[in-house]
Image (spheres, rainbow, N blue to C red):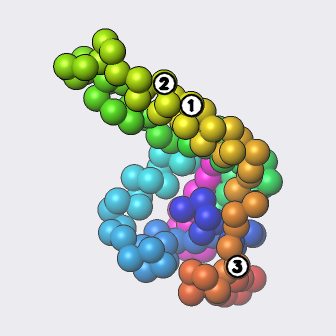
């Protein structure tokens, strides 16, 4: 949703348009948009001409911070979970490697913003400027 909004600056995008662009249910996207509004990434407007748009410029949305806010679980394997029951947990060396990989992934994401990965409007098949604007 943020990629879609970033590709159409200054334009409100409707849930219907987003659902068509991504071929995802409107009900699901409403939940996603509501979450992103609550997190301060999107703003929404009801009524005629309404929809959602970025609440802050794309260059101010850090991808590492975004992932940390939106992904609730970085438990890559069972032993990372609170009540994991892996039988080899006490001697396994894989968690250290996975933690290093996760840290590297997040470090790369920390170096980029939404603007760095924004697409052209044509990628979504929507007009770049809303009708009447």
Which residue does the image show at 54% across and 62% down from the upper left? Answer: 1
Q: Residue at x 19, y 19 (%)?
A: 87
**Depth check: 13 or 123 in front?**
123
Q: In the visual, does 77 lie left or right of 54?
A: left
Disc assigned to residue 120: 3
Task: Pick whichever, 50 or 52, lies toward us.
Answer: 52
Residue 94 x, y percent position in the rendering = 40, 29
Give the left or right position of residue 117, taking residue 27 as reference.
right
Residue 45 visible here = no
Q: Position of residue 52 (x, y in %)?
A: 58, 62
Q: Residue 129: where, in percent of width, then height?
A: 71, 82
Q: Judging from the image, what secondary structure is the residue with disc 3 in?
A: loop
Q: Residues within 10 Å of mark 3 (few under 14, many from 20)?
A: some
Magenta stretch in the rendered image: 40-52
Residue annotated with mark 2: 96
State the SS at label 2.
Answer: helix
Sequence-wise, which precedes: disc 2 or disc 3? 2
Cβ–Cβ below 8 Å for labels 2 and 1?
A: yes
Given residues 4 and 71, the one toward you in this image is 71
**Vertical arrangement, residue 9 with respect to residue 90, above or below:** below
Q: Residue at x 70, y 67 (%)?
A: 118
Residue at which label 1 appears = 100
Q: Is residue 49 magenta?
A: yes
9 magenta-colored: no
Q: CA distance from mark 2 to mark 1?
A: 6 Å
């Amino acid at each position: 949703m943020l990629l879609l909004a970033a590709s159409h600056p200054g334009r409100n995008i409707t849930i219907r348009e987003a659902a068509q662009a991504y071929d995802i249910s409107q009900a699901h996207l409403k939940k996603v948009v509501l979450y992103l509004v609550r997190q301060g990434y999107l703003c929404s407007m009801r009524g005629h001409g309404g929809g959602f748009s970025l609440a802050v410029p794309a260059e101010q949305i850090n991808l590492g911070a975004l992932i940390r806010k939106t992904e609730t679980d970085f438990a890559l394997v069972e032993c990372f979970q609170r009540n994991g029951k892996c039988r080899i947990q006490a001697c396994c060396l894989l968690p250290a490697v996975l933690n290093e990989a996760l840290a590297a992934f997040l470090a790369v994401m920390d170096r980029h913003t939404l603007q760095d990965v924004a697409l052209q409007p044509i990628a979504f098949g929507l007009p770049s400027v809303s009708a009447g604007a």
